Image (cartoon, rainbow, N blue to C red):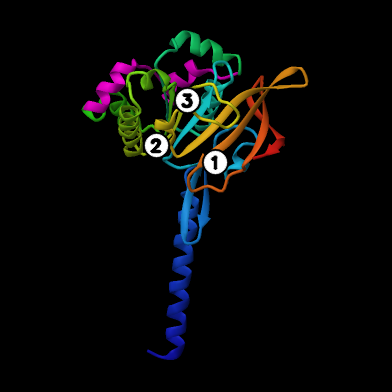
């Protein structure tokens, strides 16, 4: 083979590689931001929370387990549902698992934000599953159960468990809680879905009391009320997020007609 032919051959190979790369880029899943870290690509799943994704490099890491912690009425369920709505808008199949909420009441409450979950359910994009903590305990012993069947059959990509508080109360000591949490989050990772769990707990500005769950989740987001200028103010902070360069500042957030909105102006640094 002549030198000229060799050069042409190399050009063809180079063009072929570029063509394959373009095809891969075009096939990137909708709603998932791809971030590169060195030679490794990390897929990011957007949350749908205005001004939030910019604080966590574009979204949650794909297939991660994330936890939102806060007291009753702070907005945990709204945060979690907004995350699912973002997926539904992009054609993703989403699952909402609850231990306490009744379906009719939940649908009615979320309709106030313009989220018609009944319509989403009819389209096959949303599944509501009322589950008792005892059933979850049995699921861990069986290694899957009903939840796993739904996830695999419907190809669920986003999961919310709201809330995990009742489940945690089934176990008396910290070691048992941690072992159960390890088993539960291990199952979630096997399902290859991005999960968000909520925990009802009074947060003292950055201090989380539930140590058993803290070690097993990939990220922790705290929501809390603070007295400021004679009124209560909603604030949030990200205290942990594996594999992510996240903001360490404290931000104000508000619950508006279309859900949670993060105020870009931070309150203070940690």
Residue 228: x, y in percent?
74, 23
Residue 248 picture location, percent across and down: 62, 42
Q: Is residue 116 magenta?
A: yes
Comes first in the chain, label 3 or label 1: 1
- List the single residue furthest toward the bottom: 2
Q: Which residue is drawn at 52% across and 30% down?
A: 83
Between circles 1 and 2, the one closer to the viewer is: 2
At mark 1, the secondary structure is loop
What is the C-alpha distance between the residues marked 2 and 3? Answer: 14 Å
Residue denoted by label 3: 198
Nearer to me, 7 or 218: 218
Instruction: Tell me the CA gap for discs 1 and 2.
Output: 19 Å
Asked if one can make out residue 31 in the rendered structure from this viewpoint, the answer is no
Number of the label disc, if any, that sits on residue 59: 1
Residue at 44 percent across and 90 percent down: it is 3
Seen at 31% across and 25% down, the residue is: 147
Q: Earlier in the sequence, mark 2 or mark 3?
A: 3
From the image, tell me which residue sits under label 2: 216
Query: Few, some or many C-alpha atoms within 10 Å of disc 3 (few <14, some 14-19, many ≥20)?
Result: many
Quadrant of res 233: top right
Can residue 87 be seen in this snapshot? yes
């Amino acid at each position: 083979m002549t030198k000229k032919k060799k050069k042409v051959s190399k050009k063809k190979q180079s063009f072929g590689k570029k063509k394959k790369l373009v095809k891969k880029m075009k096939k990137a899943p909708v709603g998932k931001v791809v971030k590169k870290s060195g030679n490794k690509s990390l897929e990011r799943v957007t949350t749908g929370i205005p001004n939030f994704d910019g604080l966590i490099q574009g979204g949650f890491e794909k297939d991660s387990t994330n936890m939102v912690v806060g007291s009753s009425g702070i907005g945990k369920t709204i945060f979690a549902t907004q995350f699912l709505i973002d997926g539904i808008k992009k054609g993703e199949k989403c699952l909402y698992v609850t231990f306490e909420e009744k379906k009719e009441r939940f649908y009615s409450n979320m309709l106030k934000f313009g989220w018609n979950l009944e319509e989403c359910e009819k389209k096959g994009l949303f599944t509501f599953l009322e589950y008792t903590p005892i059933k979850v305990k049995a699921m861990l012993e069986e290694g899957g159960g009903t939840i796993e069947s739904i996830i695999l059959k419907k190809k669920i990509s986003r999961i919310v468990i709201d809330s995990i508080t009742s489940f945690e109360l089934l176990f008396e000591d910290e070691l048992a809680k941690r072992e159960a949490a390890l088993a539960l989050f291990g199952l979630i990772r096997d399902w290859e879905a991005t999960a968000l769990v909520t925990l009802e707990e009074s947060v003292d500005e950055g201090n989380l009391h539930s140590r058993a769950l803290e070690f097993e989740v990939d990220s922790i987001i705290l929501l809390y009320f603070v007295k400021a200028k004679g009124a209560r103010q909603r604030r949030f902070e990200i205290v942990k997020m594996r594999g992510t360069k996240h903001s360490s500042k404290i931000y104000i957030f508000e619950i508006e007609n279309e859900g949670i909105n993060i105020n870009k102006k931070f309150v203070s640094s940690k």
